[in-house]
Image (cartoon, grey):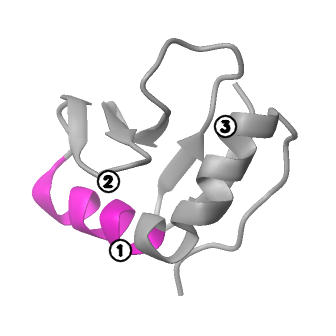
Amino acid sequence: MPEVARFYGIIIKIFFGDHPPPHFHAVYGEHLGVFSIETLELIEGDLPERARGLVTEWATLYQKDLLAIWQTQEFRKLPPLK
């Protein structure tokens, strides 16, 4: 699963060929969250509240890029949250 971004101890990954709906994975220590790219909602997992907020803030900035990566399956790194 390619790493798309990393910030504040959170790793964002997209698995190509994964099941719909379009989504990405956020890993924070032992916690894992799966987020919908279209709604940016946590659809699976157990990320702590603060990490979930940071992921949503980051994904809001790069939502179109994430959807393009999902649709084209062309990997590229995205900037971290600053």
Residue for badge 1: 57
Label 1 neighbour load within 10 Å: few <14, some 14-19, many 20+: few
**Whole-percent x, y for residue 30 in the image:** 33, 31
Q: Residue at x 12, y 57 (%)?
A: 49
Q: Secondary structure at mark 2?
A: loop
* Badge 1 vs badge 3, beta-carbon distance below 8 Å: no
Q: Which mark is residue 78?
A: none
**Whole-percent x, y for residue 70 in the image:** 67, 37
> Does the magenta-highlighted stretch encompass residue 70?
no
| Kind of residue at disc 3 | Trp
Q: Quadrant of residue 69?
A: top right
Q: Residue 62 versus residue 6: which sits nearer the camera?
A: 62
Q: Residue at x 71, y 36 (%)?
A: 71
Q: Secondary structure at mark 3?
A: helix
Label 2 neighbour load within 10 Å: few <14, some 14-19, many 20+: some
Give the left or right position of residue 27, taking residue 50 as reference: right
**Whole-percent x, y for residue 16 in the image:** 71, 22
Q: Quadrant of residue 21?
A: top left
| Kind of residue at disc 2 | Leu
Q: Residue at x 70, y 73 (%)?
A: 79
Residue for badge 3: 70
Q: Residue 3 versus residue 22: which sits nearer the camera?
A: 22
| Kind of residue at disc 1 | Glu
Q: What quarter of the picture does the N terminus occupy?
A: top right
Residue for badge 2: 40
In this rendering, the label closer to the viewer, 1 or 2: 2
Cα–Cα gap, marks 1 and 2: 9 Å
Main SS of residues in magenta: helix
Q: Secondary structure at mark 1?
A: helix
**Whole-percent x, y for residue 63 in the image:** 52, 63
Label 3 neighbour load within 10 Å: few <14, some 14-19, many 20+: many
Magenta span of residues: 48-58
